[in-house]
Amino acid sequence: MAPLGVSSTSCGPRLAAVLLLAVTAVLGLGAAQLCDEYYDQTCPDVHRIVRRVLKKAHEADVRIYASLTRLHFHDCFVQGCDGSILLDNSSSIVSEKFARPNNNSARGYPVVDAVKAALEEACPGVVSCADILAIAAKISVELSGGPRWRVPLGRRDGTTANITAANNLPSPFDNLTTLQQKFGAVGLDDTDLVALSGAHTFGRVQCQFVTARLYNFSGTNRPDPTLDRGYRAFLALRCPRDGNASALNDLDPTTPDTFDNNYYANIEARRGTLQSDQELLSTPGAATAPIVGRFAGSQKAFFKSFARSMINMGNIQVLTGTQGEIRKNCRVVNGG
């Protein structure tokens, strides 16, 4: 049984083939569904291998679990969960790594390389880079104290990148309406928005994403009125007006490296670090406000919804079957 009541389709190779044929015949679709047992025969140690590499990386970098979770988000919101964020610049690729939301911000690429190398040694040509991101996010959350879920697998890697779409990722500066539009555009609803925003319960953020709230919110030359004054004073010490824009702050000052529901309690105390965090509650008439309250009051409810929303997000425009490829190197398309 999947933990926390999150269902996951059980489908070995035979059942997957049967389901594919049935869906294709009835709906005229060409893509197979994802399946949590996808690598049981072809790479049975995939989860153990990824876990081993991540735990070793964490010994040197306490931020890596949050960073890898963010990579999966930033991949899936740009032309689906296809590993496109991992592609470097080439004669045919304009890398998403240099889009505004990713440049000097998204991180963890060498760890993904290490995971890929370990998997290529164990089961060459089998596990996609897109699936590596999904598995790494799942294990990162779990190792940080968060929920467990069976991650559906079987994604294949794309052969293109889209820096234009990457420049339009959900932003720390977005208001609630914009956030809802961006999530809705990829088939995610308000519960997904609030639950997935809860990933800000761990990790760090640069001052450049905070200072506008402290000194010049929406061009007013005043601080964001929804920000608690005491917390604003604390952040101002960390991020002075003319200070280092790249200086780091805990997204959750209470338990910065633990995956828990304190993020929502912070929002209720008007201590959401980012504008996009506080918008979930402080926007007048926000449909997301009761969801914030529910998650603040019940970590179990948050964990259950987060697991479900991660599965929902992981299904965005996936490539399966004969679509795309299985990259040998996550940074370049095969033959590139």
Image (tube, rainbow, N blue to C red):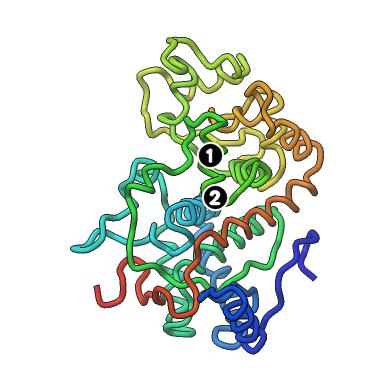
Q: In this view, does 23 lie to the left or right of 148?
A: left
Q: Where is residue 302 in the image (x, y as percent from the top left)?
A: 74, 46
Query: What is the number of the mark on residue 113?
Result: none
Residue designated by label 1: 181
The structure residue drawn at horizontal position 60% and vertical position 88%, both measured from the top left corner, is 41
Q: Where is residue 113 in the image (x, y as percent from the top left)?
A: 40, 67
What secondary structure is marked by label 2? helix
Kind of residue indicated by mark 1: Gln
Eyeballing the image, is 231 above or below 300?
A: above
Residue designated by label 2: 66
State whether residue 227 appears in this view. yes
Kind of residue indicated by mark 2: Ala
Eyeballing the image, is 4 above or below 42?
A: above
Q: Position of residue 315 (x, y in %)?
A: 57, 62
- For marks 1 and 2, give the one nearer the viewer: 1
- How many C-alpha atoms fall within 10 Å of the one at disc 1: few (<14), some, or many (≥20)? some
Eyeballing the image, is 88 above or below 335?
A: above
Who is closer to the viewer here, 209 or 321?
321
Q: How many labels does the image show?
A: 2
